[in-house]
Amino acid sequence: MNTPLRTSLFSRILQAFGCAALLSLSTGCSDTSTGNKPDDADKAKPVAVSISVVSSAPLAQTLVRSGSLRTRRSVRLHSQEEGRVEALPVFAGDAVKAGALLVRLDDRLLRAELNKAEATRQQAEQDLTRLQRLVERKLISEDELLRAKTALRVAEAEESLLKTRLGYATINAPFDGIVSERKVEPGDAVPKFAHLLTLVDPQSLFTEVSVSELVLPTLKIGDAVPVRIDALGTTQYSGRIERIHPTIDASSRQGMVEIALTSVPPGAQAGQLCRVYLPGEIQERRTIPLTALRNDTEGEYVYTLDASNTARRTRVTSGISLGDRIEILDGLQDGDRVITRGFINLSAGDLVEIVTAPGDAPTQQP
């Protein structure tokens, strides 16, 4: 092959490679430009959020105080006569009705003494009747008749005393209740004033809680307050302030408040831990939903919306927690709109779309 021919062929090959390279570069640039378009569209797409409007209202902080349940009506039954325990048909945990037999002591000795006193009283009555007939016939003096009357009164008093003592040998339930303690057994010989049983009224449960002297003026007898019993779950039961103690502890500045359960729930027992929810002082408070408050290394903030529905990061200072809302002391004004849901991929400056999530209350939009 001659030299001019080789030169021409080589030039054509170079031209072909150059066109291919340019075509490839042009195609790559076109693909890169096309690939950016979806990203730009995603970035411009509004973020779906839920919002709430900041508002102020008279609200009270709920104060939670813990205490133990106690029974208002509880009686320790003691023997008023000595003797052997003849009957004791109840055990700890037994429910009894008012008037039911709880304890009976051996009363044979007392009955014998009562029989003797009855006989003495009958003899005194007969003596008085006989002397009254003699006085009418002027056969005895008035002094003898007076002594007979006195003897009859003494006999009657002795009989009455023994009847009373005989009644002490039997102990009946003074009210409907539950036996909480059984201290003796049948056959035991007990002295006077020995502790035999304890009876409690399970329907008289109440608790005592300590309350600051600053809160006491806001409470009054008869106020309804919720009570939660830990052993029975998270259910709150109705209670009522029954008594506010008249003195305050000088060291702790705390006063005692008694709260009685309006209706005792099944399973409630003395000694259980309970929590009382007391209303605090009512004040005008600016609040937002607790879900709207965010935190970072610089402190607390919320996302607010401007007129064009653009998210702005706003620094705030929070106050007390009020259930599912929180007080805002600084940073917001009534009517401001704050984002409560939709924080994923949300940044300051993003355009948002306001939606209502299930369970959200409708919010006003400008």
Image (spheres, grey):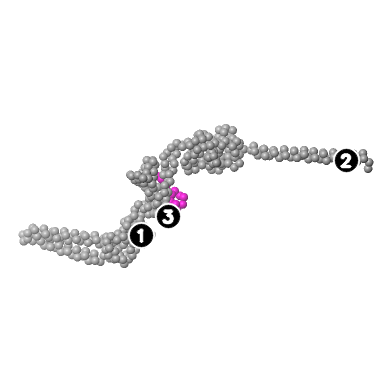
Check contact, mark 3 vs mark 1: CB within 8 A.
no
Check contact, mark 2 vs mark 1: CB within 8 A.
no
Q: Quadrant of the C terminus?
A: top right
Residue annotated with mark 2: 10
Q: Is residue 192 magenta?
A: no
Residue shown at 24% from the left, 64% from the top: 110
Picture coordinates of residue 135, whole percent (x, y): 8, 59
Q: Earlier in the sequence, mark 2 or mark 1?
A: 2
Mark 1 residue element: strand
Q: Which residues are magenta?
A: 223-236
Q: Earlier in the sequence, mark 3 or mark 1?
A: 1
Q: Amino acid at mark 2?
A: Phe
- The disc placed on residue 267 is 3
Q: Nearer the viewer, residue 285 or 355?
A: 285
Q: Amino acid at mark 1?
A: Glu
Mark toward the viewer: 3 or 1: 1
Q: Nearer the viewer, residue 179 or 299?
A: 299
Mark toward the viewer: 2 or 1: 2
Q: Residues within 10 Å of mark 1 (few under 14, many from 20)?
A: some
Q: Residues within 10 Å of mark 3 (few under 14, many from 20)?
A: few
Res. 259 visible in picture: no
Q: Amino acid at mark 3?
A: Gly
Q: Nearer the viewer, residue 2 or 265?
A: 2
Picture coordinates of residue 172, whole percent (x, y): 31, 59
Residue annotated with mark 1: 181
**Total marks placed:** 3
133, above or below 258, in the image? below
Instruction: List the single residue furthest toward the left.
Output: 138
- In screen coordinates, is 274 left or right of 161? right
> Separation of disc 3 and disc 1 at Cα?
19 Å
